Amino acid sequence: MRLAQGCLAGISAMAFCLLFLVSEPLAAQDAAPATPPAAQQATPAEATPSAPPATAPADTAATGSSAQAKPNDKTKPAAPAQTAAPAVSQITQAAVQAGVLKSASRINQVVGFLAGKHKSSAYLFTPKSNPDISVFSVSLGVHTVAGQQQYASASFVPLATGVSAAVYDTVEYSDKPPAELEKGLFKNLRRKGTIGKDIIALDAGPVTVFLMPAGTGSVVIKKEVVQ
């Protein structure tokens, strides 16, 4: 993955860094192949004066005359395959380089979920001071399988408990109006209410889905708080 970075200074207490990820996010490292079992080697026995069998067995070594091989009972079993290490995104790497350490694991988890293996670009909001105890935020542009552009935003903050909390939103456009989406694509979700009179809020467990009118279609927003 190639990474181009530019920084904007003097805007506010945050330094804004723009990352363009022009290829798919870093893929997980391949697991090391299992060690093949040791090859069995036939150990020839002394030839006997008796006549050889009419059909020599498969594990018989012939050196001028037939001799039956001893079975190798010390064959080593195959070593178990190594577990692949989790992929570390370039966004996580940039956050760590900026001094955001306590939230690094959560950043990698959420960014990996949002971007997956799709091509994406990112805009980082990096704290200028005390980065390891401050809010770190990132905006993502994700190219979906359908070829559409999806916007996503995630913010992270370390907690006193030692873990990091996060909140993320995804935004995408649909050419269908909210009422049609509610009765069709999201028919299994329970309506939680509305924001104002036009924005529908649907319950999808830990995720809340918002359907907002946009022209003849809708803007679909999904939001989750991760503790």
Image (cartoon, grey):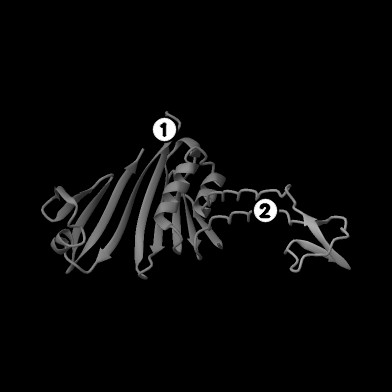
Q: Residue at x 24, y 61 (%)?
A: 219
Do the CB atoms of the residues marked 2 and 1 lie less than 8 Å apart? Answer: no
Q: Real-space Cα distance between discs 2 and 1?
A: 43 Å
Q: Is residue 179 positioned above or below 202 on the image?
A: below
Q: Name the residue that disc number 2 marks.
A: 35
Q: Residue at x 74, y 57 (%)?
A: 39
Specify the quadrant of the image occupied by residue 64. bottom right
Structural crowding at the residue carrying mark 1, measured as other residues with C-alpha within 10 Å and reported as few (<14), some (14–19) or many (≥20): few
* N-terminal label among 2 and 1: 2
Question: SS class of the residue under badge 1?
Answer: loop
Which residue is most to the front? 50
Kind of residue at disc 1: Leu
Q: Is residue 45 visible?
A: yes
The label on residue 21 is none
Q: Is residue 133 positioned above or below 5 on the image?
A: above
Kind of residue at disc 2: Thr
Between disc 2 and disc 1, the foreground one is 2
Residue 12 percent across, percent down from the top left: 42, 46
Q: Name the residue that disc number 1 marks.
A: 159
Q: Residue at x 36, y 56 (%)?
A: 152
Quadrant in the picture for the N terminus: bottom right
Q: Is residue 170 left or right of residue 66?
A: left
Q: Is residue 112 left or right of residue 191?
A: right
- Front residue (pair 4, 86): 86
Q: Residue at x 53, y 52 (%)?
A: 87
- Front residue (pair 135, 147): 147
Quadrant in the picture for the C terminus: top left
Residue 34 percent across, percent down from the top left: 63, 54
Number of numbered labels in the structure image? 2
Structural crowding at the residue carrying mark 2, measured as other residues with C-alpha within 10 Å and reported as few (<14), some (14–19) or many (≥20): few
